[in-house]
Image (cartoon, rainbow, N blue to C red):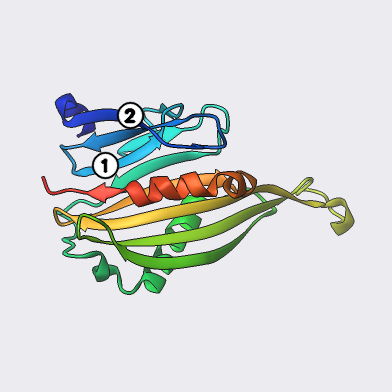
């Protein structure tokens, strides 16, 4: 669907101070007039095609840091407002469950720890209601899952990530902007990542 109307994609750029740990002083804006959404992203992030989402950008230096946008099909469900998900707390549970389903592993000795860090709602300058959900997921694995003796199976932390979701409804669709970043990177770039979150808009098409 995204490749059918290239004229519907608009990139603009503008200066923002202290953007992304001083790796860039500029954000770009991605506007999809065909599917009806827009957001800002760091100008040094690159678009990755075939990543499974409607659109996908990632940091070329921190490979675990990326953003994507996905949306539902009106033929399978017709959303009128983001409140169709329930209150933000209920939406947070659904978002976390979806993440854990996607990250499910069949490897022996893998364990995931997850926490919903915050859920909130806000009315943006377009007058629409958006939900924001933040979760942390840690993945642990045994370094020798086939070892017979428990003392030979040492658990280590594989990754520790922050997941930030912004949910909005328009065109009878539920839209989700997703940001993924290592927890340590989030601590350094929180202000700018929230700038991306706050920039997400859904638009009528």
Q: Nearer the viewer, residue 175 or 199?
A: 199
- Residue 38 in view: yes
Q: Residue at x 52, y 50 (%)?
A: 103
Q: Residue at x 45, y 62 (%)?
A: 97
How far apart are the two marked residues, 2 and 1, measured between alpha carbons? 13 Å
Q: Residue at x 50, y 57 (%)?
A: 100
Image location of residue 106, percent across then percent down: 58, 50
Residue occupying the far left of the picture: 205
Corner quadrant of residue 27: top left
Image location of residue 83, percent across then percent down: 26, 70
Left or right: where does residue 93 sit relative to residue 161?
A: left
The image shows residue 22, relative to residue 87, as above or below, that is above
What is the crowding at mark 1: few (fewer than 14 residues within 10 Å), some, or many (at least 20)? many
Corner quadrant of residue 86: bottom left
Q: Nearer the viewer, residue 5 or 73?
A: 5
Q: Nearer the viewer, residue 130 or 82?
A: 130
Q: Which residue is mark 2?
A: 13
Q: Earlier in the sequence, mark 2 or mark 1?
A: 2
Image location of residue 12, percent across then percent down: 28, 29
Q: Which residue is mark 1?
A: 38
- Residue 104 in view: no
In which quadrant of the rendered image does the N terminus lie? top left
In which quadrant of the rendered image does the C terminus lie? top left
Q: Secondary structure at mark 2?
A: strand
What is the crowding at mark 2: few (fewer than 14 residues within 10 Å), some, or many (at least 20)? some
Q: Residue at x 60, y 43 (%)?
A: 185
The image shows residue 64, relative to residue 160, as above or below, that is above
Left or right: where does residue 183 sit relative to residue 175?
A: right
């Amino acid at each position: 669907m995204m490749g059918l109307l290239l004229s519907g994609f608009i990139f603009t750029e503008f200066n923002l101070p202290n953007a992304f740990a001083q790796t860039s002083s500029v954000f770009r804006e991605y506007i999809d007039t065909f599917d009806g959404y827009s957001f800002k992203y760091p100008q040094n992030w690159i678009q990755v095609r075939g990543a499974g989402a409607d659109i996908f950008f990632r940091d070329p230096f921190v490979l675990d840091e990326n953003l994507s946008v996905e949306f539902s099909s009106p033929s399978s469900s017709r959303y009128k407002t983001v409140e169709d998900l329930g209150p933000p707390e209920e939406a947070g549970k659904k978002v976390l469950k979806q993440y854990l389903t996607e990250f499910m592993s069949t490897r022996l000795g893998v364990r995931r720890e997850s926490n919903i860090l915050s859920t909130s709602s806000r009315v943006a300058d377009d007058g629409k209601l958006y939900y924001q959900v933040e979760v942390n997921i840690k993945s642990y694995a045994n370094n020798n899952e086939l070892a017979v003796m428990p003392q030979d199976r040492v658990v280590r932390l594989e990754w520790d990530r922050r997941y930030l979701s912004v949910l909005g409804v328009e065109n009878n669709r539920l839209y989700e902007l997703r940001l993924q970043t290592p927890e340590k990177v989030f601590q350094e770039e929180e202000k700018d990542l929230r700038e991306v979150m706050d920039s997400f808009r859904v638009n009528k098409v």
